[in-house]
Amino acid sequence: MSWEPVIGLEVHARLLTQTKIFCGCSTAFGAPPNTHVCPVCLGYPGALPVLNRKAVDLAMRVALATGCEIHPQSVFARKNYFYPDLPKGYQISQFDRPLATNGSVEIGGKTIRIHRIHMEEDAGKLLHDAAVTRVDLNRAGTPLVEIVSEPDIRSSEEAAAYFSRLRQILMFVDACDGNMEEGSLRCDANVSVHRSGEPLGTRTEVKNVNSFRYVARAIEHEIERQISVLESGGAIVQETRLYDPAADETRPMRSKEEAHDYRYFPEPDLLTLEVDEAWVGSVRAVLPPLPSARSKRYQSEWNIPAIDADAIVATRELAEYFEATAEASGQPRLAANWVRNEVLRVLNDRRIDLSDYVVTPEMLAKLIGLVESGAIGGKSAKEVFEEMSTTGDAPALIVERRGLAQISDPSAIRVAAERVLEANRVQAEQYRAGKAQVFGFLVGQLMKETRGKAKADLANEILRELLDRA
Ligand code: ADP
Ligand code: MG
Ligand code: ZN
């Protein structure tokens, strides 16, 4: 029987507050080292923490968005350990009474259960140079949520899908900016293998898997390593391993610490966190719709195919862009096509963010309107779209400047069609004598005569009518 991988992820997400979790220092990323610090986050003796209400709001958003139960009371605890980036000698976290438990996230039809979500503070950062290591405590005290999954994940692909779905949800509810380069979202993977039907195997925890590419690769490697240890008769030791992207391998970092190693105890300087129904209700009230709900609405209300709807809700910005276009144009299905195919392509090709894109939903809606009213043809619309994506000019202006307006006046097309039949009498006779293929040639001549601007269905209809009449 083959080995089955079992994976549980612990994801740390930095909450999007202006200030730190227990003091008023700024959380802005990238400031000169040790400029966003104060006695509280530097761990001076006697300095007292005060909980940032906004951090709790955001943590609750995450809990609600993942279907967790929020506990009316939760308790901050000291997690004691020594490290140079942790001046207090302990991290304020939550231990046996976390903010929320029992949620879930869907990935492609499968449910991954969330065991718990708790709040904690981030540590500082060590900066290693050739000769010295420096410490920057700007990050110390930044609010985090840790989202701990149940061991429900069964492959590296599922792990990456779960991580990316979490990121999407966090960003949709504006709880985290999802910026992995800046460390706003970090992931540790717990990995074990067993024969299915048998008890779970011993797990290792792989640290430092902070990109989607690395999550999958690091886990894949760890699975293979464990299988080969077990197949050669060895045993897996519970330990913490570090993924090294350069060497593309995991290496032992330290033996796995147990909860009792940290001497957790309730933080005496903070009160029990009490969250009443009214507070939860006020957070729920401002929770933006989630990607899954939005996608379902596009499908049921607007008849948009699931595959398009899911692609459009990739980010909240794109979803909102699409919704604005759909509403302004009154043509949700066409709007979906434009956004999914053309807008995404341009953003991709030019490597720009939607926020830097010159075409607003209103402009795109106008373009859709021009096609719908027959003012321009489909091919011209693509041309106008390219140009407006570069210049930011209004579609009507581009249509006029380039002379792309479509001829949808039947009498104008009729005049042109008569000229074409006059100039191509031989072919017209052949058609009338039963050679149907000549029709295509005559349509081509008519399009040439009108420089491609005759409305295609009208051109066909009028030409046929003239040919059949004589
Ligand atoms: P700890 O507090 O020691 O990190 P937890 O019980 O909180 O341990 O589990 C941490 C993570 O490990 C969770 O995401 C959980 O799903 C995962 N996990 C638990 N047991 C296993 C296992 N046998 N194989 C893989 N992952 C596991
Ligand atoms: Mg852990
Ligand atoms: Zn501070």
Image (cartoon, rainbow, N blue to C red):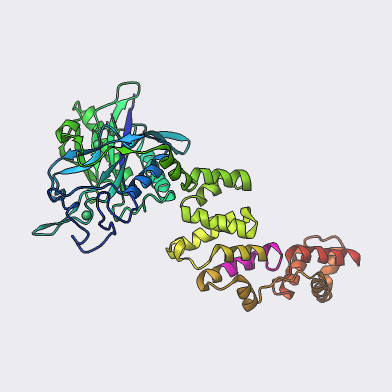
At 26% from the left edge and 32% from the top edge, which residue is drawn? 96
Position of the C terminus by quadrant: bottom right
Tell me the residue at 22%/47% (across/down). Answer: 49
- Between 192 and 42, the residue placed more toward the observer is 42
> Taking 284 as reference, is 258 above or below it?
above
Observer able to see residue 227: yes
User: Residue 172 or 241: which is nearer the viewer?
Assistant: 172
Q: Position of residue 138 (x, y in %)?
A: 22, 57
Q: Residue furthest top?
A: 198
Residue range of the region highlighted in magenta in the rendering: 371-385
Percent across and percent down for residue 425 are 84, 73
The quarter of the picture where the N terminus appears is: top left
* Identity of the residue furthest to the bottom in this view: 401
Total label count?
A: 0
The residue sitting at 47% across, 39% down in the picture is 108
In the displayed structure, does residue 458 sit left or right of residue 15? right
User: Would residue 350 appear left or right of 452 to someone viewing this image?
Assistant: left
The residue at 49%/63% (across/down) is 346
Ligand 3, seen in the image, is in the quarter at: bottom left
* Occupied quadrant, residue 397: bottom right
User: In the rendering, at what x and y percent does residue 394 appear?
Assistant: 58, 72
